[in-house]
Amino acid sequence: MPNYPGISSEAFRHPLDRQAEDALRRVPGFDLVARKFVEFIYERPRYIYLMGNSIQVGARQFSSVYQIFRECLQSLDISPEPALFVSQSPVVNAYALGQERPCVVLNSELLDLLSETELRSVIAHELGHLKCGHTTLMQMATWAYFAIAGLSELTFGLSSLISTGLLMAFYEWLRKAELSADRASLLVMDDLNLTLTGMMRLAGGSKKYAHEMNLDELIKQSDRYQALDEDQLNQFYKFSLYNDLSSGVFQSHPFTIERIRFLQEWATSSEFQNIRQGNYVRVGAEGSVETEPRTEEADRLKREIEELQREIDRLKRPD
């Protein structure tokens, strides 16, 4: 397994991740929500819950999982070591959270579904979120959603200030952040097919019929999905599926089929090949990172969000 000593997240962070974060931070209300979140909603309660209600992984607890975890940490040069927990849940999922107390959580059903190779890909993906510093904004997005939906008691009077536009900006960024984490997974796996196989299993994996799953067919499905964009109405439907404004439900992840296309493109890029050869930005040298121009894209996203918010406000007004 390859190691990337001293690698900075800027070496592999997807430009759409950067652009969407820029757009998010420009949305009116973000600064106020961020200040209140940092002041009052801290990662400690969740960490205490995991310590009290999950299994912390270590050398003598899920030892083989811990070994995979340690190898991924070494590959991405992450230290100090975050905590790793296994949580009892029938939902196939994993997630990263925390900044001062970073940790990765694996649901028990995930361990039962995936092979060790596929599990390595998922763990590397979650560590990619930690490496990129995604977790605070990810937690803010979840809190903002529950605050505006009235499902959280800790709103601090901000629920009326968290606009649909701000939520859309959060979830637009969340989806783009996944692309950076996918790249981290590919760096660790160093094999596109192994990474895509793990993604395929998460999208529709089955223990009973695993031997009948075919990655080549999934890639062909990705081509058919991209071809749907030839019809503009399909593009509208795709947007609506990501942002269900009528019910206030937003997708936090890009569709697996879209992630496959993004990862395929990066796997054949000179940027990926340079990193594999040891030519990458290291921690402390981030100022030298050459990125794609992002102001124009950030402004475009901001305009789209503002236009959608105006349309939502118009629809809410009585006739």
Image (spheres, rainbow, N blue to C red):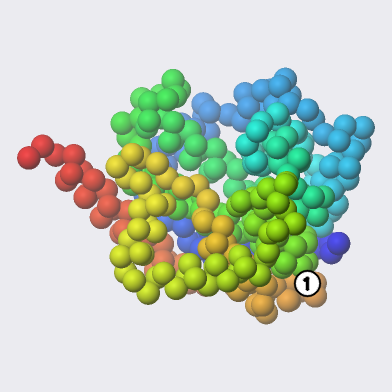
Q: Residue furthest left?
A: 319
Q: Is residue 88 above or below residue 103?
A: above
Q: Is residue 139 above or below residue 270?
A: above
Residue closest to the eye, 28 or 249:
249
Who's the residue at 71% across and 30% down the image? 87
Residue corresponding to mark 1? 276
For residue 44, say whether it is visible: no
Q: Residue furthest right?
A: 60
Along the horizontal axis of the image, is 90 left or right of 26? right
Who's the residue at 66% across and 31% down the image? 89
For residue 43, say whether it is visible: yes
Give the amino acid at mark 1: Arg
Label 1 CA crowd tier, 10 Å (few <14, some 14–19, many 20+): some
Residue closest to the eye, 109 or 259:
109
Along the horizontal axis of the image, is 40 left or right of 70? left
Who's the residue at 53% across and 63% down the image? 258
Task: List x then y, in percent, for residue 123.
Answer: 74, 48
Along the horizontal axis of the image, is 180 left or right of 297? right
Q: Is residue 10 above or below residue 71?
A: below
Q: Quadrant of residue 145?
A: top left
The N terminus sits in image quarter: bottom right
